[in-house]
Image (cartoon, rainbow, N blue to C red):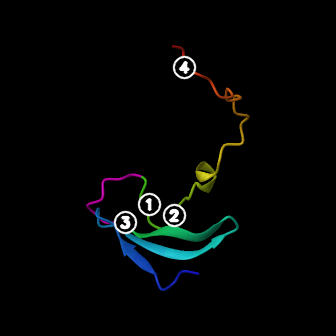
Amino acid sequence: MLKGFVHAELSCGCRLAFREGVEGSPVTVVVDRKAPSCALTLHVAGLPIYDYREALRPSTRVSPLEEEGYEEEG
């Protein structure tokens, strides 16, 4: 599933690790090592970076009805 990728290095210097994911997300990305110079508070060593796949899905809200073909005046 991971296709050979084990680690990645971010521009801030933090190192990521890729692990098998859970249902709905095939890969889990974990901050393997936080760089001393990294100022991002979201990067915490040992904690996963969550994948919000639900945000990428189409909306489940009822959409307003689209107007059927309209013609320009004039």
Mark 3 residue crowding within 10 angstroms, few (<14) / some (14–19) / many (20+): some
User: Which amino acid does the dot numbered 4 rest on?
Assistant: Glu
Mark 4 residue crowding within 10 angstroms, few (<14) / some (14–19) / many (20+): few
Q: Where is residue 13 in the image (x, y as percent from the top left)?
A: 29, 67
Q: Give the range drawn in magenta.
A: 34-41
Labels 1 and 3: the sequence-earlier one? 3
Secondary structure beneath disc 1? loop
State the mark number for residue 72: 4
Q: Position of residue 35 (x, y in %)?
A: 31, 66
Labels 3 and 4: the sequence-earlier one? 3
Q: Residue furthest left?
A: 37
Q: Are marks 1 and 2 in contact (CB under 8 Å)?
A: yes
To which quarter of the image does residue 60 belong? Answer: top right
Disc 1 to disc 4, how far (Cα)?
A: 57 Å
Of helix, strand and loop, which mostly describes the magenta segment? loop
In this picture, is 73 found above or below 9?
A: above
On the image, numbered disc 2 is attached to which residue? 47
Magenta-colored stretch includes residue 36: yes
